[in-house]
Amino acid sequence: MILIMGRVAIIGAGVSGLTCGVVFAERGYRTALFAKETGQQTTSSAAAAIWFPYDAEPAKRVIPWALNTYKTLFELSNNSRTGVSIIELRQFSRAREIEVPGWAIPLGASVISNGIGHSLEFTSGYAIKVPLTDTTIYLDYLAARFVKANGAINTNVCFEKLEDADRKFDLVINCAGIGARDLVQDPDLEPHRGQVAIVSRIENLPCAIVCDDAPLMYAIPRGNDCVFGGTNDLSSDLTADPATTDRIVTECSRVLGMERPKVLAERVGLRPFRRSGVRLERDQLRDGRTVVHNYGHGGSGFTLSWGCAREVAGLVG
């Protein structure tokens, strides 16, 4: 099936849905987004949104999508209105000799000495310059770009099944994130709960600090604030836990060797991790229409967004 300027319905309006919307609308398709919430109200708004393949499989598919997205975000960083900037990410380990991933070497990644001015508990690490998307700006940028291309955004919409999309749409794209678990009855999807604290801007933090070893911690400075994290628990609880926030802020402050900053907000999101890997494939609905599934990105929604959206478009012509 090759769509010739057909009608496209996209289910889900987080970063995956919005990016797919931009790709299709700017190619001339009559595109509409359908979601309960969009942009700042979605799981995407709770993301630290630094470019890095995390909590998504399989690597042989994830890395090409990520590198495709890296290139686009790097280009968008030239426009301050997008909310995309370039930052040095310092990835550390407390317990092992960290290796620079093969995909990171062409991007200029390099091994760094212990600590580099941070906690001496780190035994190894590497640095790499990557795109950082400020979700408070970037999601609105995507939505505005989509609408400018004549896309339509429909909120407060909850479909029980994909076939609920109006029959006037020739193609349905499933970007429902963790919602796909019920929408298409996918038992492989599981919610990886992430809680972060948004704290006041830290003047002397020029780079992002990340350590995946327990306890997971990251400090990601943005233009107007800083994101402290975090958690990665198997849970569907969207309620911010004050004790967890206290632990996150205490740990990040300790590692950075600074006094506790003011907490401006708490955010909780559910990373849509899929045990059998990201689902990006073409399928058919029971009513005969074509559907393309694009979900299960785990903690890599922003990192994979453009690469996946372009592959979705490639699957339908």
Image (tube, rainbow, N blue to C red):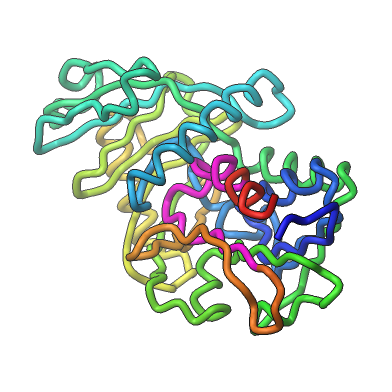
Asked if 92 appears above or below 233 in the picture, the reply is: above
Instruction: Return the x and y of residue 135 as percentages of the image width and height.
Output: 61, 42
Instruction: Return the x and y of residue 24 as percentages of the image width and height.
Output: 75, 48
| Residue 168 counted in the magenta span | no
Q: Is residue 129 left or right of residue 177?
A: left
Instruction: Return the x and y of residue 146 as percentages of the image width and height.
Output: 80, 46
* Identity of the residue drawn at 55% across and 72% down: 179
Front-most of residues 29 and 56: 29
Front-most of residues 301 and 61: 61
Q: Quadrant of residue 74?
A: top right
Q: Which residues are magenta?
A: 291-309
Q: Is residue 198 left or right of residue 190?
A: right
* Identity of the residue drawn at 39% across and 55% down: 245
Quadrant where the image shows the N terminus: bottom right
Asked if 191 appears above or below 82 in the picture, the reply is: below
The residue sitting at the front extreme is 1
| Residue 307 counted in the magenta span | yes
Front-most of residues 158 and 203: 158
Front-most of residues 247 and 171: 171
* Identity of the residue drawn at 65% across and 31% down: 83
Q: Quadrant of residue 154?
A: bottom right
Instruction: Return the x and y of residue 264 as percentages of the image width and height.
Output: 55, 46
